[in-house]
Image (cartoon, helix red, strand yellow):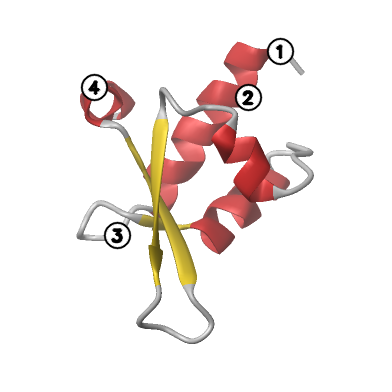
Amino acid sequence: MERHLLENALKEAVQACTNELGWANLAEIGAVLRKKGIKYGKLSNFIGGFPHLVETRIDTSLTPPVVYARLKQQYQASAS
């Protein structure tokens, strides 16, 4: 699949899963990508391929720790 199509699918998945704080659970993003037919292997590696687009954080206060992602600021307005 072409890179720009993967990028658009990732933007849409992050936007669809974003909570009220602006972050999306990585597991939920993965589910949306799978429904779109995106084959990504390890999700953290897939997202790591778009460092210009998405930033991540790990919430270690939960067990097991949960990874969240959000669109970087310059892409938030264009995603709506």
Quadrant in which residue 3 is drawn: top right
Disc 2 crowd, CA 10 A, few/some/many (<14, 14-19, 20+):
some
Q: Amino acid at mark 2?
A: Leu
Query: Circle 4 — which element?
Result: helix
Residue 56, placed above or below residue 72? below
Along the polypeptide, which appears first: circle 4 or circle 2?
2
Along the polypeptide, which appears first: circle 3 or circle 2?
2
Q: Which residue in the protein does label 3 denote?
A: 19
Seen at 41% across and 35% down, the residue is 54
Disc 3 crowd, CA 10 A, few/some/many (<14, 14-19, 20+):
few
Along the polypeptide, which appears first: circle 3 or circle 1?
1
**Quadrant assignment for the C terminus:** top left
Disc 1 crowd, CA 10 A, few/some/many (<14, 14-19, 20+):
few
Cβ–Cβ under 8 Å for marks 1 and 2: yes
Query: Circle 1 — which element?
Result: loop
**Quadrant assignment for the N terminus:** top right
Q: Which residue in the protein does label 1 denote?
A: 2
Q: Amino acid at mark 1?
A: Glu
Disc 4 crowd, CA 10 A, few/some/many (<14, 14-19, 20+):
few
Seen at 30% across and 32% down, the residue is 72
Q: Residue furthest front?
A: 60
Q: Amino acid at mark 3?
A: Asn
Q: Amino acid at mark 4?
A: Gln
Q: Residue 6 got which mark?
A: 2
Left or right for 57, reference 19:
right
Q: Which residue in the protein does label 4 denote?
A: 74
Q: Position of residue 68 (x, y in %)?
A: 42, 57
Mark 3–mark 1 Cα distance, whole angstroms, equals 28 Å
Mark 4–mark 3 Cα distance, whole angstroms, equals 18 Å
Left or right for 79, reference 30:
left
Mark 4–mark 2 Cα distance, whole angstroms, equals 18 Å
